[in-house]
Amino acid sequence: MLRPYVIINCAMSADGKIALPSRIQTRISNEEDIRRVHELRNNCDAILVGINTVLSDDPQLNVKSKYVKKRNKPIRIVLDSKGRVPLNANILDSSAKTIIVTSERCKREIAKAEVIRCGDNRIDLHRLLAILYDRGIRNLLVEGGETIIWSFLKEGLVDELYIFVGSMIIGGRKSPTLAGGDGAQCFENIIPLTLKEMKQIGDGVLIQYTVKR
Ligand SMILES: NC(=O)c1ccc[n+]([C@@H]2O[C@H](COP(=O)([O-])OP(=O)(O)OC[C@H]3O[C@@H](n4cnc5c(N)ncnc54)[C@H](OP(=O)(O)O)[C@@H]3O)[C@@H](O)[C@H]2O)c1
């Protein structure tokens, strides 16, 4: 199957949390890292998040001109099987094209976005990536949250991971972590990574991995 090259980018605390226990958006990156993320977004054809990230953070998911010289407009994609995206969500502003991916059971139409129906009850990520590839998307940036990141890893659909580790501890049993979902149930299901690079960015560290095949 031909599919886009998939990069995960995520910011976590030193204890692996990506937000507060309330799941309210938490600033973990520093200004230098935010610039890196916008440059990364600018080099990708599309940026993908799960619906819970839209509901909790209300991200715009675009590229800010203050961070890049020549600004592109990557397509924004939300995995939203039940069609729960609010009409006033920032992702539905007109700053770039938006695709809402729902299951085939969801009949909702959304005026400000294209709706792709993919998968009977749950979104079929393999089928979705083949559709996105057919539409010319070659580089896909997955920005979270923990449920989506685990799904992509579990399905073997990730090529590279950029993890920014902020110098802070968030703690809390309920705080989302880098990869959530059910996680690996046995040793054989652990996702092995290859460490490619590490560098300090201001008061944090950027770690770059590829996924072992
Ligand atoms: N620090 C960071 O870099 C960063 C980045 C992004 C988000 N976050 C944080 O992450 C948290 C949200 O994470 P989350 O895990 O609750 O939500 P999420 O990963 O954003 O969204 C998960 C939802 O996506 C939908 N979905 C559709 N197809 C799916 C599939 N194939 N696999 C998995 N999910 C699918 C499901 O809802 P339906 O069943 O309704 O479709 C699922 O519950 C927030 O606290 C946010 O602030 C942090």
Image: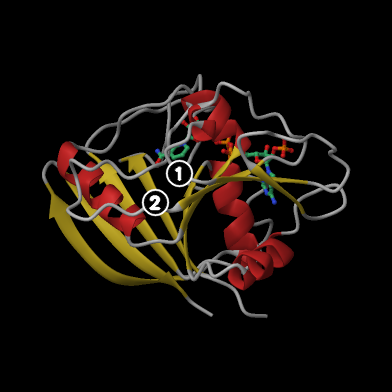
> Callout 1, which amino acid?
Ala
Identify the residue position indicated by label 1 in the image. Answer: 96
- Indicate left or right for 59 with 86 as reference: left
- Indicate left or right for 82 with 163 as reference: right
For residue 116, say whether it is visible. yes
Identify the residue shown where x is 28% and y is 45%.
165
Relative to 46, residue 101 above or below: above
Instruction: Report the quarter where the C terminus lies.
Output: bottom right
Q: Are marks 2 and 1 in contact (CB under 8 Å)?
A: yes
- Whichever of labels 2 and 1 marks the residue nearer the N terminus, that label is 2
Occupied quadrant, residue 151: bottom right
Relative to 9, residue 146 above or below: above
Percent position of residue 203, x then y: 13, 41
Occupied quadrant, residue 13: top left
Relative to 113, residue 155 above or below: below
Nearer to the camera, 23 or 140: 140
Identify the residue shown where x is 64% and y is 61%.
154
- SS category of the residue bearing label 2: loop
For residue 180, say whether it is visible. no
Identify the residue position indicated by label 2 in the image. Answer: 73
Identify the residue shown where x is 54% and y is 32%.
92
Mark 1 surroundings: few (<14), some (14-19) or many (≥20) residues within 10 A: some
> Callout 2, which amino acid?
Lys
- Tell me which colouring the rendered structure shows: secondary structure
Tell whether circle 1 marks a residue whose Cβ is less than 8 angstroms from ligand 1: no
Find ligand 1 in the image and state its quadrant.
Answer: top right
Mark 2 surroundings: few (<14), some (14-19) or many (≥20) residues within 10 A: some
Instruction: Report the quarter where the N terminus lies.
Output: bottom right
- Indicate left or right for 126 with 6 as reference: right
